[in-house]
Amino acid sequence: MKVCVSVWGRFHAFNLAQQLQKRGYLQKLISTYPAFAITKYGIDQKLIHSLWQLEALSRGWYKLPRWMRGDRNLQLWFLEQFDRSVTNYLSPEFDLFVGWSGSNYWSVHRAKELGAKTIIERGSSHMHYQTEILTEEYEKWGLSFTETHPGIYEREIQAYDEADRIAIASLFVKRTFLAQGIPESKLILVPYGTSLAEFYPVAKQDNIFRVIHCGSLSLRKGVQYLLQAFWELNLPNAELWLVGSITPEIKPFIAKYQSDRILIKGTHPQQKLRWFYSQCSVFSLASIEDGFGMVIPQAMACGLPVIHTTNTGGEDIVRNGIDGFSIPIRDIEALKAKILFFYENPDKRDEMGKNALAQARQSLTWNDYGEKITDAYLQIC
């Protein structure tokens, strides 16, 4: 089996390519990242084709003020240029083409013409569900959801139909695809992994009870509900750490729930995140929509119990009541109850943190992911 992987950006594609190369299955990796950044993942440079110019142009465009970006037509243009370029680099030397949804449509079509089987990787929920629930959430706060370009929406939907299989990472995502009439036989469900070399416990430096959120501070990630829950609990000797970039729509909530116990920690390189996890007591991901929160296995590998919503993929890897708890989206009272449980029960908190760490070490590595995903690929080819 020879596999060609195509991705705009990075996502978990480099981890996938690393696992395929390790097993002798990688034929080519096409990405907008520069080759020197990809080789850091151990990928042989001879197997890399970089379209870095598109990444540079796209990043420059996104740095422009919103008013200068207009109707976001360039967002679609960049993806179209990437997709068309990928088709030019495909040759009949592979058995399986794996492309990311949104950025690979024509290339999927071309790969099928060359006789290859095709897989679309979809890290989030079905595009229709994602757009619908995020539009609903933004409207709840008097805002408009504009992140999904109509043209990209259409490319996504068409790619679902065109590909032989759709690779997803959680039962939550699976339910959204089944609800849209996608047959279960077309779905490959394999949760993503994490790096135990990067994520492991380090010594906690004090006895302050801390809840940590890691990821963008946005409505999509449910930070508005986590802020309210923690602020209303008003627990002594407790802090909430928010690690990640701040989106404009969340700033009013940060101002509303301002407290010396709620700390904005900013963005940090991935290799430094283990320190932030390890200085905390509980990890929380209150997302409204998150196909698979890759921060969840990271936190577990650092020894933290997890509070997650049903829309994060947490149910696939967090054993409810053993490694943490699952709660409904937007349920502030449930979130408060679980935070309070961990605050009032340090022994149980430690036990569940140890369980989470053991679970991560036993079954949540990238090698575990690699074994499962390549087995699924071999069944297709």
Image (tube, rainbow, N blue to C red):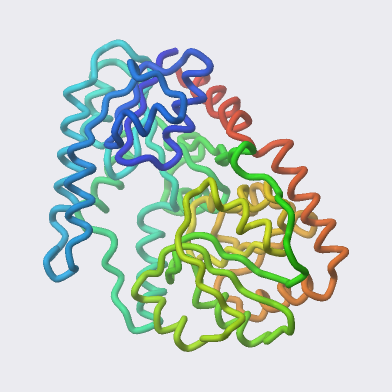
Tell me the quadrant of the picture where the C terminus can be found: top left
Name, please, the residue furthest toward the right: 347
Left of 30 or right of it: where is 280? right
Where 227 falls versus 133 (above or below)? Answer: below
Q: Position of residue 176 (x, y in %)?
A: 47, 54
Q: Residue at x 48, y 25 (%)?
A: 18
Q: Residue at x 80, y 51 (%)?
A: 354
Task: Report x, y in % for residue 86.
Answer: 22, 28
Whole-percent x, y for residue 226 in the image: 57, 75
What is the quadrant of residue 97 in the picture?
A: top left
In the figure, is residue 84 to the left or right of 30?
Answer: left
Q: Residue at x 68, y 45 (%)?
A: 200
Residue 142 is situated, as x and y percent measured from the top left of the image, at: 34, 84
- Considering only vertical position in the picture, is 47 above or below 258? above
Q: Residue at x 40, y 27 (%)?
A: 39
Instruction: Please determine whether, in this image, residue 128 is positioned above or below residue 86.
Output: below
Position of 265 compared to 210: left or right?
A: left
Furthest-front residue in this view: 205
User: Which quadrant does the N terminus fall into?
Assistant: top left
Vertical side of 263 occupied by 304: above or below: above
